[in-house]
Each structure stands twice: as C-alpha cells, then as structure tokens.
Image: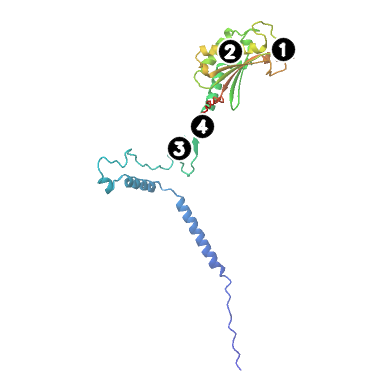
C-alpha cells in the first residue's frame, strides 16, 4: 500500500500589504487633488472672466434683429468680474466688502466706520489740548481724561473765576479761546459742567451754589459761542456742591471740588421724542 504525500498548503501572511498599498495610493491621490485645487491660477481666472465678458456683451440674433427703439440694456451696464484681492462695493445696507486672496470676506458697515472716526476725533482733540496746555497740566490746574464715551477737560476754578463770581477772568478767556479754536473744527457735542464746594454762598444774585455753578457753566458756553463753536452743540449744567471729588473737610479738598469740566461726547445722543396722538373725531 502506497501512502500519498500530503500536499502542503501555503498560507500567505502578507495579504494585508495589498490593502495597505491601495490605501496609501488613494490617500496620496487625495492629497494631490487637494493641493492642485488649492492653487489659484490668476491667468486662468482672467481668461475665464474675458470669456464671460465677451459672451454677455455680444449681441445675439434676437438683439440684432430688434427694432432700434428697443433697448435690451438701457443702462449699458457692463458685467465686470472681481479679481482676487480687489474691493467690491454693494449698496445693500451700505456695506463695504473686501475679498482677500485667502477667500475671507470681512464686512465693515457704515456704523462701525463712524465709530472708528469718532474715536479718532476724540484722540485728536485730546492730543491738541494736551499740547496747548502742557504747562497748566504739569501744574495740575488742568486735567485731561477720557473713557469710551467722553473726553473730559477739567479746570480748577481758581484760574477761571473770582470767588463767588461767574465773570470769567482774563486768563480764563485766553484758555477758552484756545479750547474753542480746537472744538469748532469738530462736530462732537460739548457739555460744560460747573461744580462748587459745600461752603454756602451769601449773595442775592446767587442764592445757592446751584445757581453759581450753573451761571459759571452758562458763562463759558456763551463765551465759546462768540468764538465760533456752534451753539446747538453746547449745553450748560450746574451740579453745585453735590458731585464732590474730594472731602470738603479741608481747604485742599474744597479747592479740588471747585472746578469746571468740559465734557466732549463721542457722538450725539438723540433725545426720546414724544409722539402727539391726533384727536379721534367721532363720525
């Protein structure tokens, strides 16, 4: 009896390499395609845009045979493609659209542009005032400060008025000549505020510190109007002794509280209007 030799079965343990090679090939092809479509060829874009211009501007048979009185494009508008990196303007919501090379489209509307402009104006006014009154600022007779809504120019009343008086001194007039010369070139609203200490005033003309502080603010407003500042931009407010910046228990503190502040607003705030309802008549 002859024994048959058992046929040996060979097991291929490297079959996974085939699938792995296919996967690597597909992955390589994918990245090649992604890289190719990410490259912008300006010359091809120009050829494509020129083709569209010729196609849209070339009259067809119906336009050629039309009567002369008919105008298919009365405004003679030409469709112009936007090149990459150029700026396009649209009238919708008055927005400026900037198309950048990377495809981002940031939108800046008119209100944001106005906000930037008013902020720059306050900075310009602050720089001019600081330059004009550098010596008085060093002597701590004038302080300039600001926040996101206002620019404040604070002046000590010792360089502006005599005690108990609302008549501006000669030095005050020179100061307000310079301030008015700066402010008249801008459109920002201006509010002049008067402050006093808590020492009661003994005057028939000014019964309380309220009247005195208001009279001083009004005198400054009227003086700046004579120097060219538009009156509709100005307002006068008197706070009397009720907005102190230092305790009134010492002469130093009371001197700090006797002051005038010129508040320059970033923009005009509209007053809430009162609508008058029409009377209802019975039929």
**3D distance between C-alphas at marks 3 and 2:** 45 Å
Q: Quadrant of residue 154?
A: top right
Q: Upstream in the sequence, badge 1 or badge 4?
A: 4
Task: Pick out the residue farthest to the right.
Answer: 249
- Label 2, label 4: how far apart the Cα atoms are: 33 Å
- Residue corresponding to mark 4: 111
Q: Residues within 10 Å of mark 2 (few under 14, many from 20)?
A: many
Label 3 and label 1: CA atoms lie apart by 61 Å
Residue found at the very far top of the displayed protein: 204
Q: CA distance from mark 1 to mark 2?
A: 26 Å
Q: Tell me the SS state at disc 2.
A: helix
Label drawn at residue 251? 1
Q: Secondary structure at mark 1?
A: helix
The image's colouring method is: rainbow
Question: What residue is pinned by disc 3?
Answer: 92
Label 4 SS:
helix
Question: In the rendered image, which residue does mark 2 sit on?
Answer: 218
Mark 3 or mark 4: name the one nearer the start of the chain.
Answer: 3
Q: Residue at x 50, y 58 (%)?
A: 28
| Separation of marks 3 and 4 at Cα, in angstroms | 14 Å
CA distance separating discs 1 and 4:
47 Å
Residue 203, horizontal then vertical, whole percent: 67, 6
Identity of the residue drawn at 52% across and 13% down: 225
Give the mark, 3 or 1, whose residue is nearer the N terminus: 3
Closer to the chain start, of discs 2 and 4, is 4
Q: From the viewer's perspective, is the residue at label 3 or at label 1 nearer?
A: 3
Packing grade of label 1 (10 A; few <14, some 14-19, many >=20) is few
The picture places residue 257, in percent across and down from the top left corner, at 68, 15
Would you identify the image quadrant in which residue 138 lies? Answer: top right
Do residues under tags 1 and 4 come within 8 Å of each other at their CB atoms? no
């Amino acid at each position: 009896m002859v024994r048959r030799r058992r046929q040996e079965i060979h097991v291929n343990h490297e079959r996974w390499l085939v699938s792995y090679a296919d996967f690597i090939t597909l992955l390589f092809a994918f990245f090649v395609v992604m890289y190719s479509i990410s490259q912008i060829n300006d010359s091809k874009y120009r050829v494509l845009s020129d083709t569209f211009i010729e196609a849209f501007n070339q009259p067809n048979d119906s336009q050629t045979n039309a009567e002369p009185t008919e105008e298919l494009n009365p405004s003679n508008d030409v469709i112009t493609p936007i090149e990459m990196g150029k700026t396009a303007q649209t009238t919708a919501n008055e927005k400026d659209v900037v198309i950048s090379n990377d495809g981002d489209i940031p939108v800046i509307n008119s209100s944001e542009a106005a906000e930037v402009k008013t902020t720059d104006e306050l900075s310009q006014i602050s720089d001019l005032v600081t330059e004009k009154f550098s010596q008085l600022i060093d002597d701590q007779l004038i302080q300039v400060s600001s926040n996101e809504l206002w620019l404040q120019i604070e002046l000590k009343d010792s360089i502006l008025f005599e005690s108990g008086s609302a008549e501006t001194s000669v030095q005050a007039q020179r100061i307000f000549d310079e301030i008015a010369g700066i402010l008249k070139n801008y459109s920002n609203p201006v509010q002049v505020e008067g402050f006093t200490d808590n020492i009661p005033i003994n005057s028939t003309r000014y019964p309380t510190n309220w009247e005195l502080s208001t009279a001083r603010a009004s005198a400054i407003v009227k003086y700046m109007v004579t120097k060219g500042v538009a009156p509709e931009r100005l307002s006068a407010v008197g706070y009397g002794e009720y907005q102190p910046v230092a305790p009134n228990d010492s002469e130093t503190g009371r001197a700090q509280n006797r002051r005038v502040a010129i508040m320059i607003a970033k923009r005009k705030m509209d007053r809430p209007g009162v609508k008058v309802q029409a009377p209802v008549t019975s039929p």
